[in-house]
Each structure stands twice: as C-alpha cells, then as structure tokens.
Image (cartoon, grey):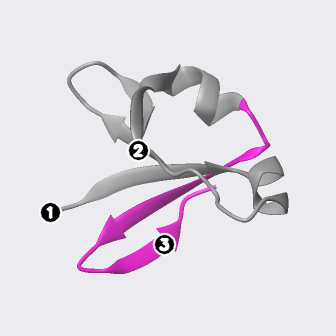
Amino acid sequence: MKKIRAIFIGDVRFDQCPVFELNNETNYFEMIIDKECKYEKVVVEEDDDFLIFEIEKDVATMLN
C-alpha cells in the first residue's frame, strides 16, 4: 500500500521529527502521533519547507 508522507525541514533541528501522512479522505496531512495537528494538502505541497515522500514497500522516494 502506497502512502504519502511529509516532514517539515525546520523540525530536523530537534531530537524527534514529526511525520505527517496524507489522509485521502480529508485531504489533510495529519501528524502520525497527533492527528489533531494537521495541514491542508495544498498548504504542504506549496510550502518549500516541507519535504514530501511516497512510501511503498518500505522504500521512500522524495517527490519534490
């Protein structure tokens, strides 16, 4: 199963980096560990400070 995930570049400064996963039903990227924290898909796609990846069979491919 293919997943689309994103990370915010600025978060790599910290010990842990939150990962956001695209929820295709809501069209929001939701933080995996806290679904209350989310961003609209278009906001993430248009923000150069987010890196977006396609995850398939444990292989991550950067999309942007």
**Which SS does the magenta portion mostly show?**
strand
Q: Which residue is mark 1?
A: 1
Q: Residues within 10 Å of mark 3 (few under 14, many from 20)?
A: few
Answer yes or no: do the residues labelled 2 and 3 have beta carbons within 8 Å? no
Q: Nearer the viewer, residue 47 or 29?
A: 29
- Give the residue displayed 23% in from the left and 60% down from the top: 2
Q: Secondary structure at mark 2?
A: loop
Write the start and end of the magenta stretch as one range: 47-64
Q: Position of residue 8 (x, y in %)?
A: 70, 47
Q: Position of residue 25 (x, y in %)?
A: 20, 23
Q: Which residue is mark 2?
A: 33
Q: Amino acid at mark 2?
A: Ile
Q: Nearer the viewer, residue 47 or 12?
A: 12
Up the image or down, 46 lies above or below 40; here it is below
Q: Amino acid at mark 3?
A: Thr
Quick check: 11 left or right of 60? right
Up the image or down, 36 lies above or below 1; here it is above
Most extreme residue toward the left, as rendered?
1
Q: Residues within 10 Å of mark 1 (few under 14, many from 20)?
A: few
- Give the residue displayed 74% in from the left and 33% down from the top: 47
Residue 15 - label: none
Q: Secondary structure at mark 3?
A: strand
Q: Amino acid at mark 1?
A: Met
Q: Give the alpha-carbon distance from disc 2 to disc 3, as whole Å.
A: 22 Å
Q: Earlier in the sequence, mark 2 or mark 3?
A: 2
Answer yes or no: do the residues labelled 1 and 2 have beta carbons within 8 Å? no
Q: Give the alpha-carbon distance from disc 1 to disc 3, as whole Å.
A: 14 Å
Q: Earlier in the sequence, mark 1 or mark 3?
A: 1
- Give the residue displayed 14% in from the left and 63% down from the top: 1
Most extreme residue toward the front, as rendered?
15
61 magenta-colored: yes
Residue 61 - label: 3
